[in-house]
Image (spheres, rainbow, N blue to C red):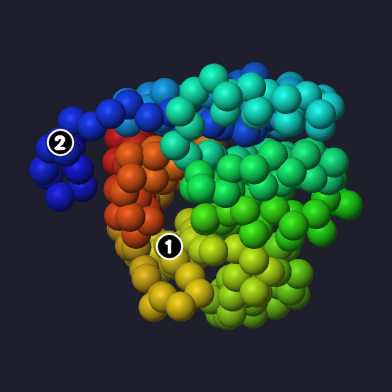
Amino acid sequence: MDRADGTVPVMRHTPHVLVVAGSDSSGGAGIVRDIETLAAFGVKASVAITAVTVQTHHAVQHVDAIPPERVAQQMRAALAANPVAAIKIGMLATSATIAAVTDVLADYREIPVVLDPVLVSTSGSRLLTPDAMAALGDLFASCTLITPNLPELLRLAAVETTGASENAVDHARRLIAAGAQGVLIKGGHGDGTESADILVRAGHAIQAFTAPRLVASMRGTGCMLASAIAAHLAFGDDLAIAISEAKAFVHGKLSAI
């Protein structure tokens, strides 16, 4: 596929990305959207399913969390079977699953990890148990990048909502202080004619990735963005380049609606 600047990338090896996420029976989000996105970049997917959800495009009807030890076994089997070059994490459901995933990642610190913190569904259903929020902090240290939208950022940083969006960078720095290497604040919930995603990293200047704000909406864009970033990291791209290319990819999908 062409890059955002119109050039054609040089053909490279085909890497594997391990996706750790929940299933979505509607196909609008979750592991289905992740695999679809990785395939668009010519990347092979391995999977560790964390939860099976029963949902339509409008509501989550039921969630069955996979036993944490089974999630860990899936991850270790995938990592043993394939040359995994990046890991993308989505829905984790419970604190026990977060702990199991964190334990596995401790043995693979050389692999870049992108965490899309799935807290609630688009329809508003909770996809992470209340007690699991604290456990996420232990996972941050294993993550190359965390990709919260503004509402998720507020919850992760445990701040009040009044006026909080004006200090989003400060909230992201709380997650950096908790151990995350990088936080990408997604601007889809912001205002204005441009949607700006802000990258905050310790020891780096803040970077903004902008695109014209679109009226169109699509379920699973968070999954799509995080998986596209993971795909580029799997090819060995710099984080900023991976984010820029992934944002252009998602913008192109939304523009086509």
Vertical side of 220 occupied by 133: above or below? below
Which amino acid is tagged 1? Asp
* Position in image of residue 42 (x %, y %): 32, 26
How many numbered circles are shown?
2
Tell me the tag on residue 220: none
Vertical side of 239 occupied by 16: above or below? above
Q: Residue at x 51, y 63 (%)?
A: 182
Vertical side of 26 occupied by 134: above or below? below
Can you tell which quarter of the image residue 157 is in?
bottom right
Q: Is residue 254 visible?
A: no
Can you tell which quarter of the image residue 164 is in?
bottom right
Mark-to-mark CA distance, 1 and 2: 27 Å
Name of the residue lying farthest toward the right? 131
Q: Is residue 168 visible?
A: yes
Q: Quadrant of the C terminus?
A: top left
Observer-nearest residue: 165 or 58? 165
Kind of element beneath mark 1: strand
The residue where tag 1 is placed is 197
Q: Residue at x 57, y 28 (%)?
A: 79
Observer-nearest residue: 34 or 95? 95
Neighbourhood count class around disc 1 (C-alpha, 10 Å): few under 14, some 14–19, many 20 upward: many
The residue where tag 2 is placed is 10
Vertical side of 197 occupied by 230: above or below? above
Residue mark closest to the camera, 1 vs 2: 2
Kind of element beneath mark 2: loop
Which amino acid is tagged 2? Val
Q: Residue at x 69, y 39 (%)?
A: 104
Q: Residue at x 64, y 43 (%)?
A: 107
